[in-house]
Each structure stands twice: as C-alpha cells, then as structure tokens.
Amino acid sequence: MRKSFLASNIKYLRLKKGMTQLDLAHLLGRKGTSTISEWEKGKYGPKKETLHLLTVIFKISLDDLLYRDLTTYPLSSQQESAEEISYISENLPPTLKEQWIAMGTELLNKKDIE
C-alpha cells in the first residue's frame, strides 16, 4: 500500500493558493474550520465526494493529491499546466470540448503566423 500524503498536501495546496482554513471550508460548503484542521492533522480524511471537490479546487489529479509529497516534490509550472489541461479535458461536456480544441488550434495557427 502506498503512503498517503493527503494531510500535508491539503495544507500545502491551501497555503499555496493563499487560502485560510475558513476559505477552504466555505468553498466546500462547511461553516467552520474544525474539519479542515482535522484533515490537515491527518486525524481522518475527506469523503470520496469531498476528495473530488478538492481536486477541482486545487486543479490537481486525485493521484497527486493522495500520493505525491507536494511539500518535497512540488509540481513544476509545466506539470501544473498539464494538470489543468487534463482537468478541463475530463470535465468539459463534448460540445464545449470541441470549442475548446478549436480555440486552441486557432491560437496555435496565430502563433505560426507571428
């Protein structure tokens, strides 16, 4: 079984985004900070649905959130971009995904002209 870095990663990502525990709690629909504090201490972890919300808030894969020690091996800006692209690709409905790809293609074509 792989070691989980969830507790330290939640705190690391929250601070990296400049968020307080209360900010994160509100984004997750909670009124107070006690749950966030318990997660960050490793006393217990979020439920599956909340884990998904955390991946959305932090724009990170579930695998990286759980198993990558971000405090020691943070994502590079290129990896962060790849995570965001992956997240967008996985979560856009098909019609919007087609528009997104078309916009990207248009930007690439403009780059070639300039």
Image: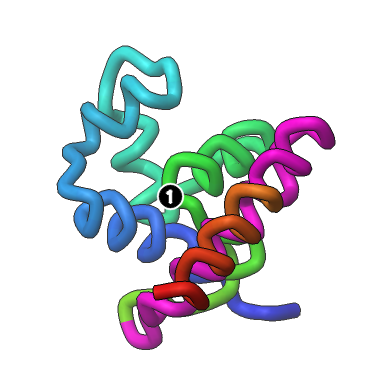
Taking depth in this image into account, of 24 and 95 the one nearest to the observer is: 95
Q: Is residue 7 left or right of residue 72?
A: right
Chain part drawn in magenta: 72-100
| Residue at image point 17% right, 38% down | 20
How many badges with numbers are in the image?
1
Q: Is residue 62 left or right of residue 95?
A: left
Tell me residue 107's x, y (percent): 52, 60
Question: Splitting the image into 4 quarters, where does residue 46 fall?
Answer: top right
Residue 17 located left or right of residue 40: left
**Mark 1 surroundings: few (<14), some (14-19) or many (≥20) residues within 10 A:** some
Q: Which residue is mark 1?
A: 58
Q: Residue furthest right?
A: 94
For the point 69% across and 39% down, the residue is 99
Residue 91's image quarter?
top right
Tell me the colour scheme of the image: rainbow
Q: Is residue 14 left or right of residue 27?
A: left
Q: Residue at x 48, y 73 (%)?
A: 113
Residue 4 drawn at (x, y percent) = 57, 70
